[in-house]
Image (tube, rainbow, N blue to C red):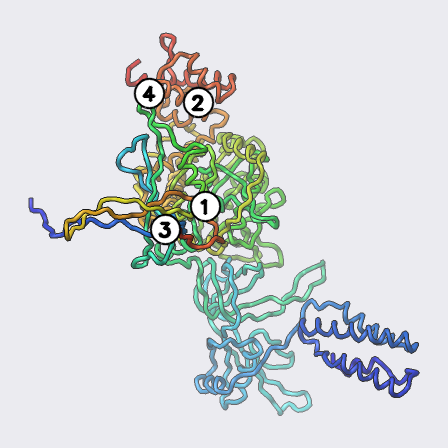
Amino acid sequence: MDQQIIFKLINLDTLNVTKEEKADIHGVLIKLSYEINPSTSDLNIKNNIKVIEEIEKFLLTVQEKHKADFKKAIEFFRYYKSTNILHRSIPEDNGIEDPFLQSVIAKNTQNSIIKVSEPLNYEQVKNLARLVFEDTQNKPLIFTISNKHRIEGKVIGEIEQRKIKLPVAWKAEISPKEDSDKKTYVAYIFGQKIPKRTKIIDEISGEFYLYRFLSKDTKEYVLISTEKLNLDDYTVHGLSIEVEDTKIIGDAYRLLNKFPVFFVHTANSHICTLTNHKELFAKCDEIKLTGNKLYEYLQSHKTAEGIKILEHPRWFLKFIAAFLFHKKKGITSAYPMHLLWIADRGTGKSSFLEALHQKSGESQEIVAGSSSTLKYLIPSFKEQNRPEMGALAKASRLVIVDEFFRILRLNINEKEDECGRMNDLLEHKDRQAGSGQGRIRTSMTARLMATTNPIAGTNNIVSLVDKFDDSFLSRFLIYYQTDDHVKFIHQKMKEDTLITKEWIEVNDFLSIQDYLQSFDSQYKRERLVKLCDKFVPFLSETVRGLYEARYLHHLECLLDGIVKVRCLSTRDSNFTAIEEDYQEAEFVWSIIIKSWFKQTIDELLKDQKIPLEMRSKFIPEEGIYILRTLANLGFKATPTALKEKCRLEMHQTRLHFNLSLLVQGGFIIEKNDLLYHYEWAEVEKI
Amino acid sequence: MKLEASDKVAVPQKRPYIKKGFYHARLAEIRPKKNESKYGKKIVLIFDILDQRYQKNGKFLQLATEVYSEYKQEDNSYRTAITPNSNITQVFMALGWKFSNQGLDTNDFIGAEAEVLVEDYEYDYTDPATNKTEKTKASTINDVNPWEDEQPGVVEEKIEG
């Protein structure tokens, strides 16, 4: 747009005014339109709109005063203002600096694929290939991998397991129809359309690995790399080229579209930006991280109105922190502990998942189990399409699934087939998946946090093991939300929501998490084996299989995480388990295992075949309170005195129920109208 | 059994002394006090004074304060000192704790920042060179308040006279 357009639209000759007046109007228009710029940028367009509004105002006054007709110009202004530009295609600069061109010519006398640090765009790469081809005698083909673009994301799968030969530049012979002797030669590079009537007489191919890459802004690329990459998180520099692709949108209609192909110049894995404990603690000091801040962060949810805290018990937050920070473990292939949290509706699961998702750095949203199928989680091969990686493999660090059991569509006959399909992925094994439609090598790098309602009779561990294949279940640390935890959530729901200003930048949190996941803490394994074995007597035959398969692995992961949480909070660079850590692990572990027996805990407490010391870990909170009160009363008291003391804390019915449970379990001994605490009774041999 | 010998001897150190006032500080360490105090068990909270004037070899000057963690009862048993109005509760609430009956893990507050009130006290210091004992001033933390990032760095009290 320029001044001339304005004067083309405004015909001043038809104005019925004096020469002087016409000159004045012309002068004003020149002055006003002087600031019109070419519409090459949003800023220029914005400025032009301001100018044309001024001109429009002026024209309307002239129109009214002199009964003139500027309809054409005013319509033009209206359209100019109301049209929005969604995408502008700006031609890329194709200039090549001469010294650079000469150096390429001097160094590459043969067909070559070269890597340059210069940020050459695709147009420049094309131009470079053409100039080198035309300016030299032996006309070499050059394909340049430049350092122009940068993408961040995850390599989600291998398209081919080995290097494949890929042609990237061609020498084409063009001979016009009328004069077949007059031949010309042209160089074409990858991504360029080669005209139909050309004859390819030479080509250059490179050996590359092909990967599928999902960027943080959820754009999918085909990654072409000379180096082998892991199925991990990377920052990749290189050259992005858009090639033509088609999408099927109807039975017979294909929509043309552009698919990005990325030639890798350099790829840096950003699994860990911190390299030692010193850097870790410096980062913690920088973000003023304390244990308290960490727990608040884990349970806080950032919304437009502020950062809300959805409170959970402290032990649970420590457990989640340990889940996020532990290093995966295993003999042949290391895999993490995955979590399966089972609880009824309204117990804070989904809101906690949302809060956790905000800290995961994942572009993939929370998987909604109620409206997904298993194929959405694992690799699948649709007809006439690229293989789908599945949500488990696509995630980098954390994959969150809500309503997990609804995905599995509980069907007792198919349980093994259905669930077993996830087993290799959950163990983070590198596997090739395939069907008649294609194949793909993939591996999961994320840990899975799944929550679910106890649907279709899965409200205790026995029925759960009955419904699912236990080799599948054993890959998860299963937590049935305890009554105390549920009560805590319900209580907090009644209170005013806490708002905080404290927040940790997700990248800072992830760099701490990545670093902690990169090394093992030190602990005595034999002590863990003992702790794990302690719980075996409580388990029935069916559940024992599940527990013995992988629960020692989970306990190791838990302790590793607990040590790291403590060392991080106290800036202890030893990362070695101390007594406090073993006790903390036992405490959390007993809550989790105790949660399995919600319905049968009373039977368990009364089972005299199990040693008293072991059963004592399963005493409910109210029972513990009664025992503590009895101890405070001197380890023996009359029933009336004990009831009198406890009545302040619990309802009479609950008191009677718990007291009778403790008596039947042998935790309180009745003798000579007195109640004795079991520890005192042992000493006194009552 | 042959034991190694060393000519190094313990030198009595002068206790740190800085001007009275409010300082920006960070909780660096928590230790249980070795000897029991009059009314029960105490813990020692050691703070880094985040003032570059008192920094030596890249390390901040450290000052401590003590609070009761458990009170001794008549029957010689102990009860927790963490009650809504106790001193330890006030200190940890200043460090960011929200009172709850879930208990308090003091480790969770290492690294937390606070505004501390530094006061003087006098003690007898014997100079190892001259063997002379004289009354000397040292600093201690008398109060711990929440730290807000917007507040001015150091507010020193004017010393009269």
Give me the disc on residue A623: 2
Residue A312, horizontal then vertical, whole percent? 50, 38
CA–CA distance in space, label 3 to label 1 = 28 Å
Query: Hey, what amino acid is under mark 2?
Result: Gly
Q: Nearer the viewer, mark 4 or mark 3?
A: 3
Marks 1 and 3: in contact by CB < 8 Å?
A: no
Residue A106, picture quadrant: bottom left
Q: Does A87 appear above or below A391? A: below
- Per the image, the residue denoted by label 1 is B146
Give me the disc on residue B160: 3
Give me the disc on residue A209: none
Q: How many neighbours does mark 4 have within 10 angstroms: few (below 14), some (14-19), or many (20 or more)?
A: some
Q: Earlier in the sequence, mark 3 or mark 1?
A: 1
Tell me, yes or no, if residue A328 can be seen here.
Answer: no
Disc 4: which chain? Answer: A
Q: Nearer the viewer, mark 4 or mark 1?
A: 1
